[in-house]
Amino acid sequence: MSKDILFEIGLEEIPARFIRAAMEQLKERTLKWLEASRIAHSGVTAYATPRRLAVLVKDAAERQADVSEEVKGPSRKIALDASGQWSKAALGFARSQGVSPDAFTFKELAGVEYIYVTKNSDGVETASLLSEGLNGIVHAMTFPKNMRWGAYDFKFVRPIRWLVALFGQEVIDLEITGVKSGNVTRGHRFLGTETTIAEPAQYVEALRAQHVLVDVEERQALILEQINKLAADKNWTIAVKDDLLEEVLFLVETPTVLFGTFDPAFLNIPQEVLITSMREHQRYFPVLDASGKLLPFFVTVRNGNGESLDVIAKGNEKVLRARLSDAKFFYEEDQELKISDALAKLETIVYHEELGSIGDKVRRIRNIADSLAAKLGLSGETAAEVSRTADICKFDLVTQMVYEFPELQGTMGEDYARKAGEPENVAKGIFEHYQPRFAGDAVPSTEAGLLVSLADKIDTIVGCFSIGIIPTGSQDPYALRRQAAGIVQMVLEHKLSIGLDEIFAAALEVHKSFRPEKTFANELRISLYEFFGLRVKRLLADNGVRYDVVDAVTAAGFDSIVDVVDRSRALTDAVSSQADFKVTVDSLTRVANLAAKASGNAAVDPSLFTEKAESELYATWQSKHAPYAAAREARNAAEALALLSGLKDAVTGFFDSVMVMAEDEQIRANRLALLSAIDADSRAFADFGKLVW
């Protein structure tokens, strides 16, 4: 026999950003408790709205499953004394298991006999476990921020106002912070009333009757359906951003989509400003035309029904008008600020007490960007654009608009720089130097934006590492991992002919000149390599490269990100499509194992060859060494790997015919030198010994 379990925690309004994680946590903890309690069921469904978290367990067994457990004790040798009587060890084992020695059996394990005892435990009634179990689940839950209320020490995301706990039609006896469980839930705060849940299966429909859509997926589908219908009716494009949809989803219990208008005169402000103001302050969805241009409308979601929507729309329009008026004022005021005056203000803003002001950071960015431009051989005109972009890349941080909307940094800088008469590439570079902002974001398209972005990010990373701010575990307050990943992404997508070592060197040189009192040990460069190595491995893994291929190619070095990616692709193709490639891997791995015994960098002396296979291997290697080096220089990883593969027959013949560790010391050293030369080429491509077959 089975019954459904319903557990609902009624709360004051929960912050929208906490709800999905809390709902999933409640479901996960319920599943784990059911498993630990040996209660069979056919599934757990989680529900959530701003005022409740709930789980519905279908077909929960009315009794725990019985359990039969076999426990291993001491070996026969220890369990029996010299006279064949049970030893103290055996008797102690019996007491610990609550059984008589008569229950012992002997079983052999790995050639040794041990005593075993079988313990049977009958399952208890599920109903007797639920109160303690649900109480434990609630007390174990964690949240980004907690509250205490009344005189209770208990902490939760928001105060608990009601509890519904049912096992079938029976109320589970439960009390938390003075709130006793029952079978009465609460509907929509304004449209619904209290309602009785006769049995768990009625939960969703009972709340629907009280104007609450408790099913998260149903609620989201309804919001999108209404938005799409409105867009089709009006011939609009309604920009639905996932994070805003997620927030709105957990702000409402009965969603009704409506739209409003605003004065078209506000469209003179850059649309990014208007969109940000609507999204961030009002939780509105902007409306665009087919070309992506903002229209003087907005879409919002009401927590209620479709009554009096015109009144609701007018109220929202009034609030938005005030917000947009503020934005218009800030925008117009910022036009009066000269770039030179803004730069002077940066000197008064502390970036970090050990790294100086933002003005200091800008100067470091300029020097690093200039160094990178020189290394890449940019033209004088482009280098000048890089320098100017670096000089003014942060000036908009002191504008009123960015103070009000920090997420518009770069966006406002581009707009204000263009209006101030800066070159187009410089204005665009100000915006682009923040890219990529997140995984999957676009990289800068201009060389000015690209080099200033590289300089900005590596300055932050080197600066933080130099003062001991290094990400550990989940702690990364300065988003250094994201910035390192951005550098890797930019170098790869632009196929820059610059290595990580050169990027590190440029930043370290600038930091040394700016902070002469600071000692920059070589360990810092090693730490940077290790840090970026993890980002490169993540990049390869995200592109579907096998873990062993990732380990193999990065072991050969990853200073050139473009090269390591090319090598990973070539090696992946060879491993997956060439049936005989394992022969190549085995031969190169065997070469590597013996080459490790070579001493120094001794040259190969062909006059010391005594076997035909030696000469053939040497001739084959010589015929491929120069083309291999040329292919590596040309970044043709597939051709380079094919040349390495071309050694396999000669290597196999060598090992079949030649005793490498000959008694004659000169001959042995010469053979090891030959293998070492081949291994040097091989290891420059990958550590083939790390491949798994």
Image (cartoon, helix red, strand yellow):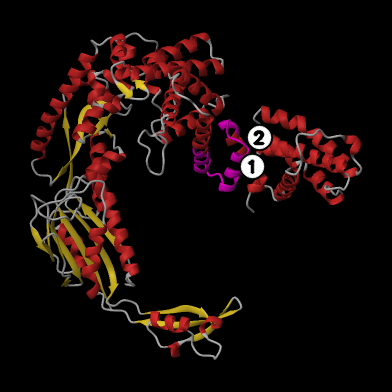
Q: CB under 8 Å between callouts 2 and 1?
A: yes
Q: Which residues are magenta?
A: 534-563
Tag 1 residue? 571
Q: Position of residue 375 (x, y in %)?
A: 56, 18
Q: Position of residue 675 (x, y in %)?
A: 78, 41
Q: Nearer the viewer, residue 406 or 221?
A: 406
Q: Is residue 122 above or below residue 402?
A: below
Disc assigned to residue 656: none
Q: Main secondary structure of the magenta part?
A: helix
Disc assigned to residue 637: 2
Q: CA distance from mark 2 to mark 1?
A: 9 Å
* Callout 2: SS: helix
**Residue 174 lies in quadrant:** bottom left
Q: Is residue 478 left or right of residue 646?
A: left
Taking the spot 49% from the left edge, 26% from the top edge, the residue there is 520
Q: Nearer the viewer, residue 101 or 374?
A: 101
Q: Amino acid at mark 1?
A: Leu
Check residue 551 for magenta coloring: yes
Q: Nearer the viewer, residue 356 or 209?
A: 356
- Give the total number of marks visible in the rendering: 2
Q: Position of residue 425 (x, y in %)?
A: 42, 15
Taking the spot 33% from the left edge, 24% from the top edge, the residue there is 351
Quarter of the picture containing the N terminus is: bottom left
Is residue 538 something one can see in this rendering?
yes
